[in-house]
Image: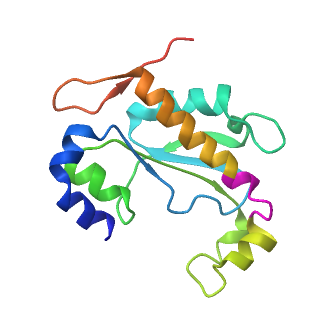
Amino acid sequence: MGSTEFVENYEDILNRNALLYLNADLAVSGSELFEASGVPSLIPLLSKVITDEVKLPNGSAVSTLWDGQFYTLGSGSDYACFLQRIGVPALDVRYIGDEYEAVYHSNYDSFYWYTHFGDPDFSFHASLTKVFGAVGKNAVRHVSFSSNTYPSFTFQR
């Protein structure tokens, strides 16, 4: 079942229970830059997580690879139906690098490529998993809802 069909089949349950949608369509394609896209209300949450909580494989904060750009979400990925059909706030984060652009969706986009070139020890995959876990944990702790709007995430330092 694809994401659109999933949302169509479970729309009532998702409307009652979904807090946010974390997208990992292209989770790790390099190790040069951390890229983030999502709804603007998630910027403070993500910024806190990648600055204070989650580290890169070398021990530095994930934010050291982030250029501060936060892109808006378009369409064409699994988050689209969650965000655009039922209004679930979505976040799409990834590690990127030049080396993957020619490989994505080609015959070379394989486990072999990842284990030899992309992320051989899967350390950036592990780091991104920690980002998603921390985002989810903090979202549950700091969310406030008002009817017919995106959740608002607030943090105090």
On screen, residue 86 above or below 63:
below
For the point 67% across and 84% down, the residue is 108
Tell me which corner region of the image, top left, top right, bottom left or bottom right, holds residue 147: top left
Looking at the image, which is closer to me, 76 or 49?
A: 49
In this rendering, does residue 32 appear at all? Answer: no
Q: Is residue 97 left or right of residue 133?
A: right
Residue 132's x, y, as percent?
54, 43
In this rendering, does residue 76 appear at all? Answer: yes
For the point 21% across and 23% down, the residue is 146
Looking at the image, which is closer to me, 62 or 22?
A: 22
The verdict on residue 124 being magenta is yes
For the point 27% across and 58% down, the residue is 81
How many numbered circles are shown? 0
Q: Is residue 28 left or right of residue 37?
A: right
Residue 148's x, y, as percent?
16, 32
**In which quadrant is the N terminus drawn?**
bottom left
Q: Which residues are magenta?
A: 119-125
The verdict on residue 17 being magenta is no
**In which quadrant is the C terminus drawn?**
top right
Residue 25's x, y, as percent?
50, 62
